[in-house]
Amino acid sequence: MKALPGSLLQQLQGIQGFDEASFIAAHQQAAVTSVRRNPAKDLGLFPSNEQVPWCTSAVYLPERPVFTLDPSYHAGAYYVQEASSMFLSHMWQHIMQGNEGLRVLDLCAAPGGKSTLIASLLDRDSLLISNEVIRTRASILDENMTRWGYMNTWVTSNDPRDFAKLPGYFDAIIVDAPCSGSGLFRKDARALDEWSEANVKLCCERQERILADVWPSLKEDGVLIYATCSYSQQEDEQILDWLANEYEVETLTVPVADEWGIVTVSSPEKGMTGYRFFPGKTRGEGFFIAALRKKETTDTISVHRYKTAHDKKIQQQASYLLSDTDVIFLQTDKENFGAMHPAHEEDMQLLQKAVYLRKTGLTLGTPTAKDWIPAHDVALSIDANSNLPCLHVTKDQALHFLKREDMGIDDAEKGWLMIRYKGLGIGWVKSLGNRMNNYLPKHWRIRMELTDSDW
Ligand code: SAM
């Protein structure tokens, strides 16, 4: 790896818990690989791997496999996530656990690491809005959230300022802010090339703007979780001081075991608590996270009761796709129908006036004159009816399916079949007896060329 920027090392001198020798030594080593299992799609994967201490569903891997070649990855059985950022799980469990029916915004959500983590910690009546302002990144977020399979995680693609139209609506907001990225030097060589003091300054101005934009939509006593993958105090502690100067807030702390190597820091001016992760001290990449509670009266948007049209015919056709029929049905676009938890009907009416809703509830598919074309999302949903006709496939067959190639199966029953790998859905085929049409959306296809040893 290239030498670390001298000006960064200089900035870090004197920062609580910084040890230059172990920091430089850690940057001579490869980034640590870790994955977080999906508790709702539990295949008992990686049983003997070492657990990430602050996240019970996550483990370290001794090396980085080619995840694309594992169909259970495509089924959403686990998410590949850098270990330090999973500390959010520990924080959430201490600060938010036991609360039900929450409205949560993950403002800077792509590709979906924090959102998939939070989705697994929420009850069914809670609603997670995963937002990503950059449209191309929003589509990756959408795929990852669909793969994770939860009906109560919706995807929006809006500028932070649009959320000001929803005053006092959210119980918790996560701002995993765009930053100068020094914490990612081991993972991403570009971060090292692009790092500069000038960029740190630009990032911290943008971070303040983002926080100011979204602040009105947090309710009184709501929780803001702020994170970056930067070591720079300007983007971390000083942002906490800025928040405490601008607004009425209270700092929140969580217990941290000494052996985790996480450094608990205090902001210089207001004594706000944050948690910093240095490679070399902690098993993970560079990261910073803090939580605070809003302590000021906030206007709250009123939620009016509306009713969506409930089409009986659609209900009958669609409900067989689901294990739980305590849902309401809605038309998601010109052709597609979907379902969502009844608890979220008013949220949809409200949100669609304020933001661009890219994904709401679960898309169920498209009715045709004689048929129902099931949406890909149903195969990945944790709410899919487990008795739907299906075809259990081997790893080879799953990879052929995921490449949209012929699986070499010619004796399957006719009709719509969910393709299942190790029991988890990965997509649909329509079997015509002697051949099958593959309904994996083209943009989900594995594009990588596979060699003999990959199968
Ligand atoms: N939370 C994500 C995860 O855990 O997978 C990582 C988020 S990444 C650190 C920051 C995100 O903020 C990026 O997806 C980036 O596109 C988005 N972003 C960039 N500029 C932004 C802006 N002005 N307002 C809001 N988000 C922005």
Image (cartoon, rainbow, N blue to C red):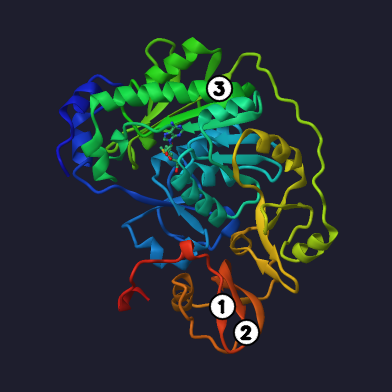
The numbered disc on residue 200 is: none
Q: Look at 80% across and 60% down and name the residue there.
A: 315
Q: Are marks 1 and 2 in contact (CB under 8 Å)?
A: yes
Disc 1 packing (10 Å; few <14; some 14–19; many ≥20): some
**Ligand 1 quarter of the rendering:** top left
Occupied quadrant, residue 101 = top right
Disc on the earlier residue, 1 or 3: 3
Query: Which residue is more in the foreground, 130 or 236?
Result: 130
Front tag of 1 and 3: 1
Q: Which residue lies under the disc numbered 1?
A: 437
**Image mark for residue 215:** 3
**Residue 114, image x, y percentages:** 49, 41
Residue 95 makes an appearance in the image: no
Q: Residue at x 61, y 32 (%)?
A: 96
Q: Residue at x 18, y 25 (%)?
A: 7
Residue 306 quadrant = top right
Asked if residue 188 lies left or right of residue 172, the reply is: left
In which quarter of the view is residue 396 placed?
A: bottom left
Going from the N terminus, do you reach mark 3 or mark 2 first? 3
Picture layout, residue 206 above or below residue 125: above
Q: Position of residue 224 (x, y in %)?
A: 54, 26
Find the distance from the CA under tag 1 to the CA under tag 3: 49 Å
Query: Tag 2: residue type?
Result: Leu
Specify whether 385 is left or right of 89: right
Separation (CA) of disc 3 from disc 2: 54 Å
Query: Label 2: which residue?
Result: 432
